[in-house]
Image (tube, rainbow, N blue to C red):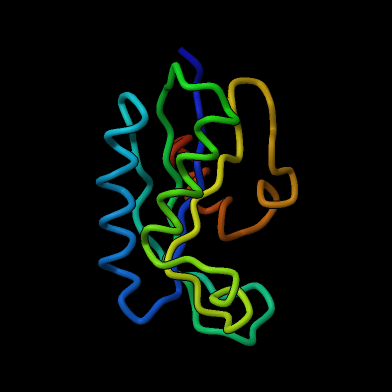
Amino acid sequence: MTTVIVSLGSNAPDREERMAGAMKWLATVIVGARFSCVYETPEYSGRYPAYFNCVAEGTTAIDADTLNVMLKEYERGAGRTPESKLTGIVPIDIDIVEYGERLLRPVEFEREYFAIGYRQLRGKDV
């Protein structure tokens, strides 16, 4: 089993429901899933609505590539399209940030919208 850390976010009008649904689904995919609280952060460019974000941690026997495909399939099923990115409204965004010892998204790892939840899971001050 490999430890995996995942970032979740939504800035859709129904972002609370979208986050709850994604968290419930993700808990069926990664073993022992723990979630930070859901918190609001501004959209990175400042041009679009604020996001609800959270960070999840658990373990999986699924390889990183297959897990990523599963996450992207969930996003599409939840309404994520190439057009949604252009409009600035993201129904749900789920990304693997760390997989085992591998940092897959170093830029995201440094962003405050991820760091808040990551610190919370690590028991550090937010």
Please identify the quarter of the rendering in which residue 88 is found: bottom right
Residue 55, percent across and down?
45, 47
Name the quarter where the N terminus is drawn: top left
| In the image, residue 86 above or below residue 26 | below
**Which of the pair 15/41 is nearer the observer?**
15
**Which of the pair 28/34 is nearer the observer?**
28
- Residue 1 visible, this orientation: yes
How many labels, in total?
A: 0
Please identify the quarter of the rendering in which residue 104 is found: top right
| In the image, residue 108 above or below residue 26 | below
| 15 sits to left or right of 123 | left
| 56 sits to left or right of 97 | left
Taking the spot 35% from the left edge, 71% from the top edge, the residue there is: 15
Residue 125, percent across and down?
49, 47
Residue 69, percent across and down?
53, 40
Please identify the quarter of the rendering in which residue 53 is found: bottom left
Taking the spot 30% from the left edge, 25% from the top edge, the residue there is: 32
